[in-house]
Image: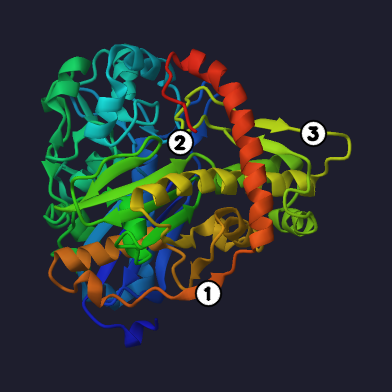
Amino acid sequence: MSPGAAERPLALALDVGSSSVRALLYDRLGRPLTGLSSRVPYEMTTSPAGGVQVALAELLGHVETALDGLAARAGRRLGDVGTAGGCTFSHSLVALDPDGEPCTGVLSWADTTSAAAAQELEREMDGPSLWQRTGAPLHASYWPARLVHLRRLHPGVAHWAGFGDLLGEWLTGRRAASISSASATGLLERRHDRWDGQLLEQLRVDPETLPVLTPDDEPLGPLRPELARRWPALAGVPWYPVWSDAACGNVGLGCHGPERAALMIGTSSALRVLLDRREVDVPLGLFCFRLGKSRSLLGGQLSEGGGSVAWLADMLGHRLEWLERAAAGVPPDGHGLTLLPYLSGERGPGYHDHARAVFSGLSLSTGPGQLFRALLEAVALRLAALDDRLSAALDRPPLVVAAGGAVAASGIWPQILADALGRDIMLPRGAAQPSGRGAALLALAYSGTSPLAAAEPVRGRFVAADAARHDVYRAALRRQQDLYELLSPAWRSANGTQRGRSR
């Protein structure tokens, strides 16, 4: 959308992902304004013990740089902004000392250093009941295990916060957790939008050490004075509490109900639907978070996605374009390999913290193209396993709208996904940043500027599934599942739990 043709007022969106920070402008109908965006890439620090984090000051600095870049590009048009919202990666956590200084970096969802604590909690608690109450399993990605683990490392911790909570404080001076982001911590009693008192008592966590909860639709306030002087055109603009990028991704793709599922493949991947009800039973292997006063986000998630693909390309020493061409010449499941792609442990559906990647069937004839295609197919097959569970919970398979940088950049992954799922999928046009668009649409809707129904519909092209190739992939999925079942007893033993049964 040309800035000159945009319908005002505009919405500003901050989208803090796992590998970049983006600041974007959208018009009243949710159309991105050409040339009026800013992107700052960054990398998280990893450790052999499973640590994945970034320094809080560094990440906030990237946000500041992104906003500076947007302000420079937008010029006087920044004065047309009437509302602002942001989203960030789910499950992040920072431990803070009594002075509010960070004791840790910003832990990513991919950080598995709390796996032993999750194992302890599994032995002590009723995991299935807790999963239904909070919508999340006991797993190293979520706060219960992380609080236990980090409290031992840092006995002086006085407060806990997600990055979104601290970002909201940096912007407005007010620290509060949106219901959307809080529901992704594993600590929220999702049916009543409050911290789970029973769980906090079991964890011996004082609720005063947690962020104050605030509704998704209530603004935190305008920019604090220092930032208002830096960007005077935004001085009076209301900022909403930072939401989960998962929920925002669905909104940005127009996936507002059970008939449409958002399949996102960025650094990681997920398959989710937004349901217009609070009471949702969570099927084994799936999660259920919240958005707004009455919506639930039901779906499954993988740690694998574009990050795994980038890792393999780096390991093989080839550019992605070269590997795509080589993989295109390999028939579906024609590589003789069976992969469990758990480079960062397993999230859905089994949530085995100690699972690790397995490449079975390697031989002297295995080449880079076969390996690359096998990895793309392995992730697609895990998504197909999640799709089976989600479709069963919805009573019918939803239309899948597939987006995200990794799938948009690939010439072969969309077809693999359609064939693995066994039905046509839609690739949206002009929705390269669905979570940022979703944040803008929510800010417009909650401010009373423009309801979600007024947003420009998401359109795209369809990738048709091939029935014969689907049969090939169903056989591959059974083979993958057999390997999973063969190895999962060892993972369950390491986890000290039986939660990973996945058939």
| Residue matched to label 1 | 461
Q: Position of residue 380 (x, y in %)?
A: 58, 49
Of circles 3 and 2, the one toward us is 2
| Residue matched to label 2 | 349
Callout 3: 10 Å neighbours few (<14), some, many (20+)? Answer: some
Classify mark 3: helix, strand or loop. Answer: loop
Circle on res. 241: none
Of circles 2 and 1, the one toward us is 2
Q: Is residue 232 visible?
A: no
Tell me how far mark 3 sits from mark 1, CA to CA: 36 Å
Amino acid type of the residue tagged 2 in the rendering: Pro
Looking at marks 3 and 1 on the same chain, the residue that comes earlier in the sequence is marked by: 3
Say whether marks 3 and 2 touch (CB < 8 Å): no
Residue 265 shown left or right of residue 66 in the figure: right
Residue 125 shown left or right of residue 310 in the figure: left
Q: Position of residue 470 (x, y in %)?
A: 63, 55
Classify mark 2: helix, strand or loop. Answer: loop
Tell me how far mark 2 sits from mark 1, CA to CA: 29 Å
| Residue matched to label 3 | 362
Q: Position of residue 493 (x, y in %)?
A: 50, 13
Classify mark 1: helix, strand or loop. Answer: strand
